[in-house]
Image (tube, helix red, strand yellow):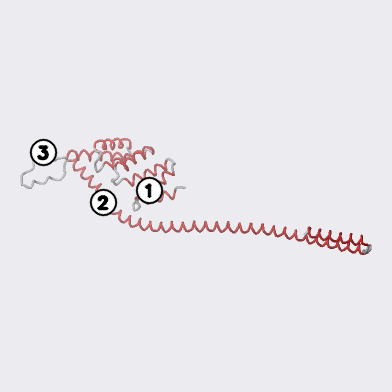
Amino acid sequence: MKVTLLKRSVKLFIILLIALLTGCATAGDLKRVQGDLGTKITDHDGKVATIQTDMATLQKESTQNAEAVADIRKRQADMGADLTDIREQLQQLRGGVEQLQKDVEAIQGNLGKDFKEKLEQTSFKINFIENFLGIGKKEEAPENGEKHNKNKPKNGSKGKSDKESIYASAYELYKEGKYEKARIEFQNFIKAHPKTEYSGNAQFWIGECYYYEKSYEKAILEYEKVIKTYPEGNKVPQALLKQGLSFLQLGDKASAKLILQNIIKDYPNTSQARVARTKLLEIK
């Protein structure tokens, strides 16, 4: 706009110059032209100033609008994140409800298992006492009707008695809180009977002895032997759980979380999985 105004001024100046040279313009004409020119310049300067002010206002408004849009986008992103978090929480709640239903069914099933296990333990104790006192079941007579020779020992009876005796003795020491003595007895049992129905349990109780002595690193190693050496035994879920709890006691939350998550994955319908879920909620 300033360039246009300058061009017009130059044109007027040239016209005036031509008029002066030709002698056609008077002094009054010159003043009038100068006045008109000054008025136009003033008007144009005012318009330029107004336009500049308007442009500054527009730029300010544009900046404010951009900031408002950015703020809206941020709030939308935050709302989106909140919605995602709410959806995840709902999914977790749904999963929790489904898992609770499974746990209830599992508890109902495990009641029978626990009862059976207690019954087997009671039967074991009775058998042990009978063997210890020598009042076991009377031997049945042979099918051919011949009398059984009482002086002849039954095959394997002595080995069975020794095995149960060592295990029961070690377990009694454990229940009495004599963990060091119990651990030694269980270790002796495993050396003498490495592959029996009691061996996996004996290995687990060794880990428990260390755990209650607060030797958590040693306990972790002994529980690992249960998992690796006796993978088909019934103490594997318990050994995993106690490994996780041992890592928690040592302050290693990352390792503890991994083990607890594996319990839930591999043994979902067990009491150990239920305890693992509770512990995972406690870990921050």
Q: Where does residue 232 sit, x and y in percent of width and height?
A: 28, 46
Are there few (<14), some (14-19), or many (20+) residues within 10 Å of tag 3?
Answer: few
Tag 2 and tag 3, C-beta contact below 8 Å: no
Of residue 182 and residue 13, the one placed in the foreground of this image is 13
Are there few (<14), some (14-19), or many (20+) residues within 10 Å of tag 2?
Answer: few
Q: Mark 3 points at which residue?
A: 152
Relative placement, left or right, of 14 versus 267 is right
- Residue at 86% x, 59% y: name it: 14
Q: What label does residue 116 carry, if any?
A: 2
Relative placement, left or right, of 117 versus 92 is left
Of residue 29 and residue 183, the one placed in the foreground of this image is 29
Q: Is mark 3 on a helix, strand or loop?
A: loop
Q: In which quarter of the image is residue 4?
A: bottom right
Tell me which numbered mark, 1 or 2, is placed earlier along the sequence: 2
Q: What label does residue 145 carry, if any?
A: none
Q: Name the residue under label 1.
A: 262
Type of amino acid under label 2: Lys
**Residue 228 visible in the current orientation:** yes
Q: In which quarter of the image is the N terminus?
A: bottom right
Q: Where does residue 94 sit, x and y in percent of width and height?
A: 42, 59
Q: Where does residue 224 sit, x and y in percent of width and height?
A: 34, 41
Are there few (<14), some (14-19), or many (20+) residues within 10 Å of tag 1?
Answer: some
